[in-house]
Image (cartoon, rainbow, N blue to C red):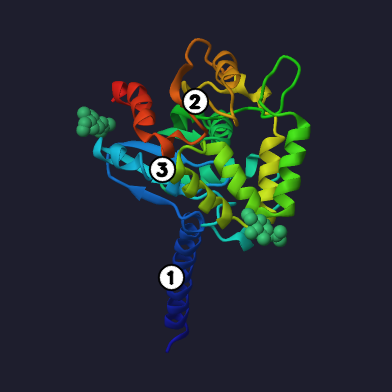
């Protein structure tokens, strides 16, 4: 073989290698978070779950959106039991920023240039921060049971005293299984047996040290100061009685989110922090008002 021919072959092999590696690493992002794209509509809906659950939390509302012709993107956040716990990076997830970065990586990888983002619970703040960083990517934010701060403060009713949070995490540490059972029932509402069972299952799928770390980060977070920077229109959906996010929080979001007078609030006539699991039809009706009128 002539040297020139050899160099040519080497170049081809190296190029092929590069392409292969790139494809591999890109897939890495989507695989790491079990990202899924369903449906093929021209409007994209991103569903982002909260603490202790995974993308299956959307299973009861998903068929509706597919039927309505949306392209729906779901994934598991890094702490979810369905993601690989050995890859959980305690430095990266010391604040919401690590998750924000992950969500943006996923959306960029999937070449999404505009979406309606639905964030449940802690994902409400993940979506809000992402929308501050990349406002053009988000046409609308739907914040389901979100809260910028869970602890009470002067003039602010987050729902929890520090002593209650300390107690919550002491019991998490002492017996994770027992804690998950109690927490699932408290958060979802004990009357919704199937939904409690479902949430308990995903709670138990988390590695306890990760659950402790993430839970503490979330319950002790304070994102009130960023709300005014969110310029994307928002819909706040909340249950009338939710121990994790009391009604005060919905009002607070309405008055503090950036676009004054542009934030809509829908209060669901039900209890619990997981209406998409316990009473999906109510959640769908609330979504309908905003998403479908725009379509
Ligand atoms: C999206 O689909 C709707 C209905 O199928 C259509 O009316 C609209 O023009 C489409 N928009 C784009 C940007 O393709
Ligand atoms: C943890 O609590 C469960 C009941 O939820 C109990 O069956 C189990 O024995 C407890 N484990 C320990 C180590 O105490």
Examine the rendering and report whether any part of residue 157 can be seen.
yes
Residue at 49% from the left image edge and 10% from the top image edge: 261
- Circle 3: element type: helix
Front residue of 277/37: it is 277
Residue at 53% from the left image edge and 32% from the top image edge: 134
Residue 175's quadrant in the figure?
A: bottom right
Q: Which mark is residue 58?
A: 3
Q: Residues within 10 Å of mark 1 (few under 14, many from 20)?
A: few
Quick one: quadrant of the C terminus?
A: top left
Give the image location of residue 83, x and y in percent. Answer: 54, 57
Give the image location of residue 121, x and y in percent. Answer: 55, 35
Give the image location of residue 92, x and y in percent. Answer: 68, 49
Q: Do the numbered discs 3 and 1 sit on residues whose CB atoms are within 8 Å?
A: no
* Residue that mark 2 sits on: 238
In terms of sequence position, does the residue under pointer 1 or pointer 2 come before the other? 1
Q: Please identify, in this view, whether the residue under mark 1 or under mark 2 is nearer the observer.
A: 2
- Circle 2: element type: strand
């Amino acid at each position: 073989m002539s040297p020139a021919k050899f160099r040519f072959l080497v170049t081809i092999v190296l190029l092929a290698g590069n392409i292969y590696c790139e494809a591999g690493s890109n897939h890495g992002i989507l695989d790491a978070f079990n990202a899924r794209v369903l449906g093929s509509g021209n409007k994209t809906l991103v569903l982002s779950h909260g603490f202790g659950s995974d993308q299956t939390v959307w299973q009861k509302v998903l068929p509706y959106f597919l039927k309505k012709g949306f392209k729906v993107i779901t994934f598991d956040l890094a702490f979810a039991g369905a993601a690989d716990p050995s890859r959980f990076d305690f430095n990266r997830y010391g604040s919401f920023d690590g998750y924000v970065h992950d969500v943006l990586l996923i959306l960029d990888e999937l070449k999404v240039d505009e979406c309606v983002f639905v964030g449940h619970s802690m994902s409400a703040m993940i979506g809000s921060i992402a929308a501050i960083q990349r406002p053009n990517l988000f046409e609308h934010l739907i914040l389901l049971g979100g809260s910028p701060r869970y602890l009470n403060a002067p003039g602010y009713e987050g729902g929890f005293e520090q002593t209650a949070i300390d107690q919550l995490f002491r019991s998490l540490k002492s017996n994770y299984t027992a804690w998950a059972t109690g927490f699932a029932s408290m958060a979802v509402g004990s009357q919704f047996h199937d939904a409690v069972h479902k949430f308990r299952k995903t709670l138990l799928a988390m590695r306890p040290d990760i659950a402790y770390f993430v839970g503490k980060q979330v319950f002790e977070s304070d994102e009130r100061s960023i709300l005014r920077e969110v310029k994307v229109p928002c819909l706040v959906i909340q249950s009338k009685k939710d121990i994790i996010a009391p009604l005060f929080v919905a009002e607070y979001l309405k008055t503090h989110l950036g676009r004054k007078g542009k934030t809509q609030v829908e209060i669901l006539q039900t209890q619990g922090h997981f209406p998409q699991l316990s009473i999906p039809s109510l959640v769908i009706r609330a979504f309908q008002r905003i998403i479908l009128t725009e379509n």
